Amino acid sequence: MDTRRQHTPWYAWTAVAAIVVFCLFPFFWLINVSLKRGPDLSSSSIIPPHPTLGNYRAIFDNPDFTHALGNSIIVSLVTTALALSIGSFCAYALARLRFRGKALLLGGLLSIATFPGIAIAAPLFRLWTTPPLGLPKLYDTLPGLIVPYLTFALPLTIYILTSFFKEIPVELEEAAMTDGATRFMAFRKVVLPLAVPGMATAAILTFIFAWNEFLLATTLTASDKARTVPAAIAFFTGSTEFEQPLGSISAASVVISVPLIVLVLLFQRRIVAGLTAGGVKG
């Protein structure tokens, strides 16, 4: 029987409820606006006076949105797959090898993951539009978004997976190699299955980053060819110059938010475990 919950003071529950309401109210208001008709958009009513799904039908009838949604899915999945594939090898090496400056290197990786995107937006724009040495032009292409996304996603993936690989006993790999397995076989058949929670955490965080990214998606694209959903929403227009596309923008925001909310709710424990792994034991 959980006695701690019985002794939780009322003001603690009140504070928690206030924080939850404060955090959820913007999303509630977003849904509220997305269900309003054009004439009702200026209304401040909490409940739409004439609820309609017209805004949702409009965005899915808009080829720019559906194409951008496809681009977001491709860019997010490819970025996640590459970050996990490359990051798992780098993290395994950092977890097993002993060398000077390893802690400094991990700190540097974490710093790169939190680096502001605006710092590299202008140089990348110049590099992507006028590539040197005959390199392919990446401006307004999907690879032109995936590469810079990896710049931020890969260090975070390595940092998270390194903590998980450290928790796996080396003796398990040594036992596998004693039975005839190579180092790579021990890594693939022993280490990786045990690191699945960490891989899932890194995959979810990478996918969320690539799905939400706006600055680089706006700077490094010029058309619907490679534009992702966050950038495409910024170019939504009304049917006339006097119409505000607020309802369509709200509906599109709800559509791209729901998958992430479901993903985080399903894997919240693994995300927390991944972020706190190694926090006590180095």
Image (tube, grey):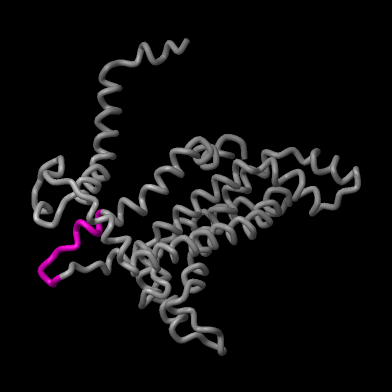
Q: For residue 242: magenta?
A: yes
Q: Tell me the residue at 70%/43% (across/down).
A: 193
**Which corner quadrant of the image does residue 81 belong to?**
bottom right
Which residue is farthest bottom? 134
Q: Where residue 50 appears, x then y in whole percent?
A: 13, 46
Residue found 41% across the figure and 75% down from its top: 225
Callout count: 0
Left or right, 161 with respect to 39, comes to right
Q: Which residues are magenta?
A: 240-250
Residue 54 higher or lower than 11, as above or below: below
- Image check: 55 left or right of 276? left
* Picture coordinates of residue 80, whole percent (x, y): 54, 57
What residue is rendered at 25% in x and 34% in y? 21
Viewer-side residue, 208 vs 104 = 208
Judge left or right: residue 216 versus residue 233: right
| In the image, residue 238 above or below residue 266 | below
Frontmost residue, 265 versus 251: 251
Q: Which residue is drawn at the image coordinates 39% and 68% (left, top)?
A: 67
Q: Residue 41: x and y, percent?
A: 12, 53
- The answer to if 38 sits in the magenta stretch is no
Q: Quadrant of the C terminus?
A: top right
Q: In this rendering, would 242 be left or right of 221?
A: left
Q: Position of residue 123 (x, y in %)?
A: 43, 77
Q: Nearer the viewer, residue 90 or 269?
A: 269
